[in-house]
Image (cartoon, rainbow, N blue to C red):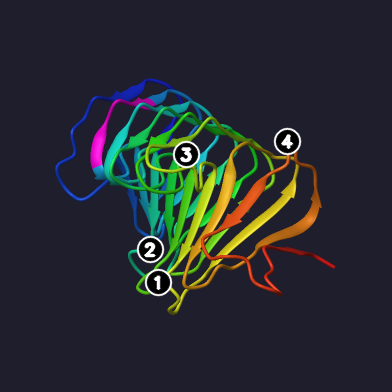
């Protein structure tokens, strides 16, 4: 499915998730223009991707609501192959998850590659207003790789931990891998919490303006590592 214009708007999804649902290992959704707006679902108010591929190249995903998580985009592993989201130009803005996490993007066992586009002015109740990455025992590893684009203006209603990105690990089989390089604009903070607070990896030349505040849930201890750098 290639979307080059038009709009998908004001739908009420009463089932589990996804106004636009991309499901299956060979399923691909490419958004080059148009808008997905004003939709509501439990997860993935705008777009839900399970095991398929979403190429978000243009257009807007805005004003959508997810009651549980992923107001704009929800990525999760339903079977062994992780879903892939390539964000290069789409504007993900003004989405909400009032009682959940990941108002912009919620990733659970997914590969998210952000080279452009924007995740802005999204609002949620708990964690990860821009991006929420959840390493869950039943799904898969998360790879969140950010080398361009803008994350800004995202807010939480109950705290300020993870306004840009929140990374949660339940300490079981799977982990989170957050990678930064290039010249992205990230405004807000990155929050690491859960049983394993895996550090953020700087995997190449990185220019950040402004600087990014990286926080952890636990009190600092000797030997803590919040950031690792490629040799």
Location of residue 35 in the rendering, given as x and y in whole percent from the top left corner? 40, 24
What residue do we see at 70% from left, 74% from top?
Answer: 222
**SS of the residue under disc 4:** loop
Give the residue at mark 1: 80
For discs 2 and 4, the disc positioned in front in the rendered view: 4
| Residue count near mark 3 (Cα–Cα under 10 Å), binned few <14, some 14–19, many ≥20 | some
In this picture, which residue range is highlighted in magenta? 36-41
Let me know if residue 40 is in the magenta part: yes
Pointer 2 and pointer 1: residues touching (CB < 8 Å)?
yes
Residue under the image location 45 percent in, 76 percent down: 171
**Quarter that holds the N terminus:** top left
Marks 3 and 1, Cα distance to the nearest angstrom? 22 Å
Dot 2 and dot 3 residues touching (CB under 8 Å): no
Could you tell me which quadrant the C terminus lies in? bottom right
The mark closer to the camera, 2 or 3, is 2
Q: Position of residue 36 (x, y in %)?
A: 36, 28
Pointer 2 local density, CA inside 10 Å: few below 14, some 14–19, many at least 20: many
Tell which of 159 and 103 is nearer to you. 159
**Would you say the magenta stretch is mainly helix, strand or loop?**
strand
Going from N to C along the chain, the mark reached first, 3 or 1, is 3
What mark, if any, has residue 210 been given in the picture? Answer: 4
Task: Check disc 2 and report the residue beneath it.
Answer: 77
Q: Which quadrant would residue 52 be assigned to in this image?
A: bottom left
**x%, y% of residue 162?**
51, 47
In the image: residue 133, left or right of residue 117: left
Quadrant of the rendered image containing residue 143: bottom right
User: Could you give the CA–CA distance between mark 2 and mark 3, rounded to whole angstroms?
Assistant: 19 Å
Q: Is residue 128 magenta?
A: no
Please tell me which residue is depicted at 64% across the width and 65% down the height of the picture.
199
Q: Earlier in the sequence, mark 4 or mark 1?
A: 1
């Amino acid at each position: 499915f290639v979307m080059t214009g038009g709009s998908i708007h004001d739908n009420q999804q009463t089932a589990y998730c996804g106004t636009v649902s991309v499901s299956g290992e060979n399923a691909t959704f490419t958004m080059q223009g148009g808008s997905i707006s004003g939709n509501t679902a439990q997860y993935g108010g705008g777009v839900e991707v399970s095991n398929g591929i979403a190429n978000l190249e243009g257009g807007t995903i805005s004003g959508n609501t997810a009651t549980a998580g992923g107001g704009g985009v929800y990525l999760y592993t339903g079977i062994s192959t992780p879903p892939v989201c390539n964000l290069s130009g789409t504007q993900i803005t003004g989405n909400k998850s009032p009682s959940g996490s990941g108002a912009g993007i919620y990733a659970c066992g997914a590969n998210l590659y952000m080279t452009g586009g924007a995740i802005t002015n999204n609002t949620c109740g708990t964690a990860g207003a821009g991006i929420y990455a959840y390493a869950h025992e039943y799904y898969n590893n998360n790879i969140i790789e950010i080398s361009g684009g803008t994350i800004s203006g995202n807010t939480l209603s109950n705290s300020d931990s993870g306004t840009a990105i929140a990374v949660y690990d339940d300490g079981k089989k799977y982990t989170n891998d957050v990678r930064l390089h290039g010249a992205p604009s990230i405004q807000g903070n990155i929050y690491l919490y859960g049983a394993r607070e895996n550090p953020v990896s700087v995997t190449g030349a990185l220019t950040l303006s402004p600087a990014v505040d990286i926080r952890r849930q636990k009190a600092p201890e000797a030997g803590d590592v919040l950031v690792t750098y490629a040799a």
